[in-house]
């Protein structure tokens, strides 16, 4: 799995892998990683589709909190 480079001082613990699923598919990330960066590192760039035209939607921002994201855990 290719990872996005973590900034200095980040809270990502690369010694602890975490498994999760997205749209029924299994993925892996690391403790402290965001869901968005774990999906992007695994090659999953399309996260949803627009309501009207079903155009692909991806990651809007890579900040820790995204006001435009809807996630159910």
Image (cartoon, rainbow, N blue to C red):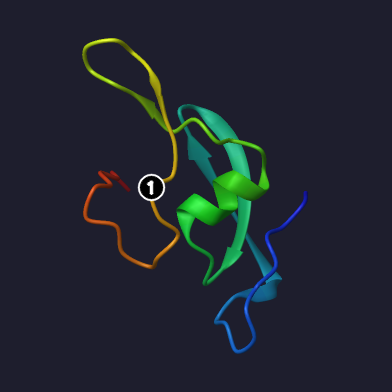
Q: Position of residue 19 (x, y in %)?
A: 59, 50
| Tag 1 secondary structure | loop
* Residue occupying the point 65% across, 73% down: 6
| As drawn, 73 above or below 16 | above
Which quadrant holds residue 54? top left
* Residue occupying the point 29% across, 21% down: 50
**Number of callouts in the render?**
1
* Residue occupying the point 28% across, 47% down: 69
Circle 1: is it few (<14), some (14-19), or many (20+) Cα within 10 Å? few
Q: Position of residue 3 (x, y in %)?
A: 72, 57
Q: Is residue 66 left or right of residue 22?
A: left
Of 28 and 41, which appears nearest the observer? 41
Q: Is residue 21 left or right of residue 8?
A: left
* Residue occupying the point 61% across, 56% down: 29
Which quadrant holds residue 9? bottom right
- Most distant residue in the right direction: 1
- Most distant residue in the top direction: 53
Q: Is residue 7 left or right of residue 55?
A: right
| As drawn, 19 above or below 45 | below
Q: Position of residue 31 (x, y in %)?
A: 56, 69
From the image, tell me which residue sits under label 1.
Answer: 60
- Most distant residue in the bottom direction: 9
Of 13 and 53, which appears nearest the observer? 53
């Amino acid at each position: 799995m290719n990872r996005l480079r973590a900034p200095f001082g980040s809270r990502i613990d690369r010694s602890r892998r975490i498994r999760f699923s997205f749209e029924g598919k299994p993925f892996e990330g690391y403790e402290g990683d965001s869901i968005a960066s774990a999906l992007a590192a695994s090659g999953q760039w399309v996260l949803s589709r627009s309501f009207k035209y079903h155009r692909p939607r991806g990651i809007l921002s890579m900040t820790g909190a995204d006001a435009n994201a809807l996630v159910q855990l």
